[in-house]
Amino acid sequence: MEPSVARPDRTLIAILSVIAAIVVIAIVVVFTRGGPTQVDPTTPEGVVQAYSRAMVDSDYETARSFLASDVRDNCDRAEPNFIEGLRMTIISTDDRGSSAVVRVAMEYGSGAFGGSSYEYDGLFALTREGDSWKLESAPWELALCYNQGISE
């Protein structure tokens, strides 16, 4: 009599294959996920995005280029704020032609499963200078100059 050879259970192989496929898909999604959506830099939202990115990156010269001329010319430099872990989402834009207000949701911290987070709305006020939008005020965390005003 010949000894019987144990054959692998097909159900077990199918389940393990599905789990392996899910893991591979999750890894691909995590590593191919891009950064934030780029907004047209000629719009108020684009100026807010570019200015905020410059401030988070501590690129104060670039951030300064987005300030309205009266703010820039009279800039009493504020101490940079620690902005690690800032996530911003544009909520709305009120474009009045020569001025605009961009409302954003600002969130700090890890939130969800990583601990506590803090979220609130911030306002950016912009004005038209020629063909460009320039910032007159920003939330205090992102203010480069004391005379930039504080949007509440």
Image (tube, grey):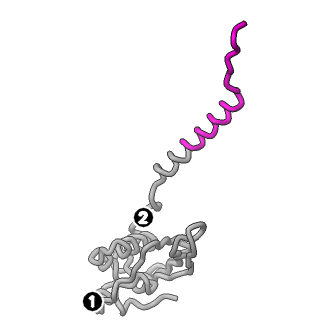
Query: Percent x, y for residue 152?
Result: 52, 88
- Count of labels in the image: 2
The percent position of residue 68, horizontal first and vertical second, equals 34, 84
**Residue at (33% x, 87% y) in the render:** 79
Q: Amino acid at mark 2?
A: Asp
The numbered dot on residue 34 is none
Image position of 2 (left or right of 104): right
Residue 3 lies in quadrant: top right
Q: Position of residue 51 (x, y in %)?
A: 38, 74
- Secondary element under disc 1, as helix, strand or loop, is helix
Vertical placement of 11 versus 119: above or below?
above
Q: Report the magenta residues as a range.
A: 1-24
**SS assignment for the magenta stretch, majority:** helix
Q: Residue at x 63, y 36 (%)?
A: 16
Mark 2 surroundings: few (<14), some (14-19) or many (≥20) residues within 10 A: few
- Quadrant of the rendered structure where residue 18 is? top right
Give above or below for 77 relative to 23.
Answer: below
Q: Secondary structure at mark 2?
A: loop
Q: Which residue is mark 1?
A: 73
What amino acid is found at the position of numbered circle 1 in the picture?
Asp
> 63 or 81, which lies in front?
81
Q: Earlier in the sequence, mark 2 or mark 1?
A: 2
Q: Say if mark 2 contacts mark 1, CB within 8 Å.
A: no
Mark 2 vs mark 1, CA separation in Å: 26 Å
Q: Residue at x 53, y 70 (%)?
A: 110
Q: Is residue 94 magenta?
A: no
Indicate which disc residue 40 carries: 2
- Looking at the image, residue 66 sits to the left or right of residue 23; the answer is left
Q: Is 15 a magenta residue?
A: yes
